[in-house]
Image (cartoon, rainbow, N blue to C red):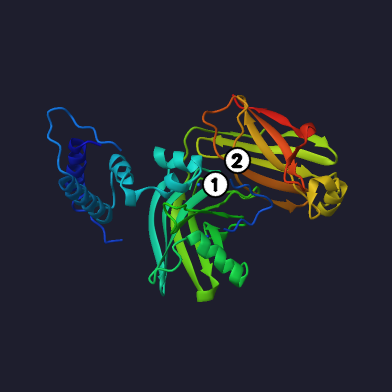
Amino acid sequence: MNPKQLDQELDGLRGDKAEEVPELVRSRMNSVYQELKGSGEKVTPGRRRRSWWQRLLITAACAAVAVLLTIGLGFISPAMAETLKQLPFMKSVFQLAGDSGLKQASITGVTSGVQQSVTHGDLTLSISELMYDGSRLSLVLTKKESDGGNPSFYEWWNTRDMQLGPANNIDFYINGELANTAWGMAPGGTASPESVIVTALESPNLHVPEAFNFKMVVFIPDIGQTFSFELPVKKKTLESIVLRPEAAKTFDHINLHIKRLEISQTTIRLITEVKGAPGQDIKALQEAIPDKYKIYGSLNLLFDLQNDQGQTATMIGGNGNGQGNALSSSSSYEPFAAMPKSVVIKPYIWTQDSSKLYIPELEMTIPVQ
């Protein structure tokens, strides 16, 4: 945004919203599996170049104005919001440390700006960014300790888990009901160590509406306090498609069903089911499957997704559960660069030597377009 455009934005904010100034205003993945993989200045001819200290003063002044506007106004235009993101201290954590889908969501404006903080004693937790695209909900959770503390939220959380046992916890509620969902936590990286990205609502049998009241409760046991956040959430997505192919193949007593494939510019999500024979319970189903597909006695089935160009999507998380006579799983991936014409689902397992053993007899191709 050039100076003239910035002036126009500021004038509009002053004129339209002058009387609407408000008061200043949960890594652990409980999953069956998870894969994790981190300006030259143009000088216009005929224009006098300012000295470095003049530019510094001007930059500082503009930054101060931007902060005051952000704090003081309940609304800023999309153009101004994108301008503020370019300032170092206003940079989106999704853009700094998120996967390609979260980066795309932030750039294209399908994230929601949230400003909620809860303080107990010397510890403050806050939520800033949030994305819900129907396939997953991700948010930025930030920690601040009055005495400084460990600057890395991710290390701080995991250290406490190792010292106290798996006691730190996060619960999620949808319209007041506790959601039976696994969740994951990713570090904010070197650029934002005080933040983590929390992702949830990916579980295979969880039904989430497009709009709902969302509540997140973070429990830190050694201080005996919960940090509760509550806000309305609405699905926002770019180009997306949901497929329910009901495709199925059977091999080595693995009766695999593809239940759902969600593809958008922010997330790819695959929901599968391994069903037992009629009257066969989960225990009998597991016992019938050869041991080479299992880890600690349980089926360890994962999936690669390839588009029609042979490109493989990067897996970012997954979880599963067993109910009735079926083992259900949900796997999430970074988006493809463009909407594919078809997706090849390639089941595999991790062997003891940490290599992939594909099961081509269970491979399936799902048409998209």
Q: Residues within 10 Å of mark 2 (few under 14, many from 20)?
A: many
Identify the amino acid type marked 1.
Answer: Arg
Q: Is residue 149 left or right of residue 255?
A: left
Residue 361 image offset from top left, x and y in percent: 80, 32
Image point (53%, 68%), residue name = 219
Tell me where residue 249 sits by quadrant.
top right
Which SS class for mark 1? loop
Q: Is residue 54 left or right of residue 138?
A: left
**Circles 1 and 2 in contact, beta carbons < 8 Å:** yes
User: Quick one: quadrant of the C terminus?
Assistant: top right
Q: Is residue 70 left or right of residue 98?
A: left
Q: Closer to the camera, 165 or 271? A: 165
Q: Closer to the camera, 290 or 112? A: 290
Residue 9 image offset from top left, x and y in percent: 21, 41
Which SS class for mark 2? strand
Residue 185 image offset from top left, x and y in percent: 54, 55
Rendered position, 222 above or below 210: below
Q: Where does label 1 land, which residue?
A: 136
Image point (15%, 27%), residue name = 45
Residue 123 image offset from top left, x and y in percent: 42, 70
Q: Residues within 10 Å of mark 1 (few under 14, many from 20)?
A: many
Q: Closer to the camera, 38 or 297? A: 38
Q: Is residue 224 visible?
A: no
Q: Is residue 119 visible?
A: yes
Q: Where does label 2 land, which residue?
A: 269
Image point (40%, 69%), residue name = 119
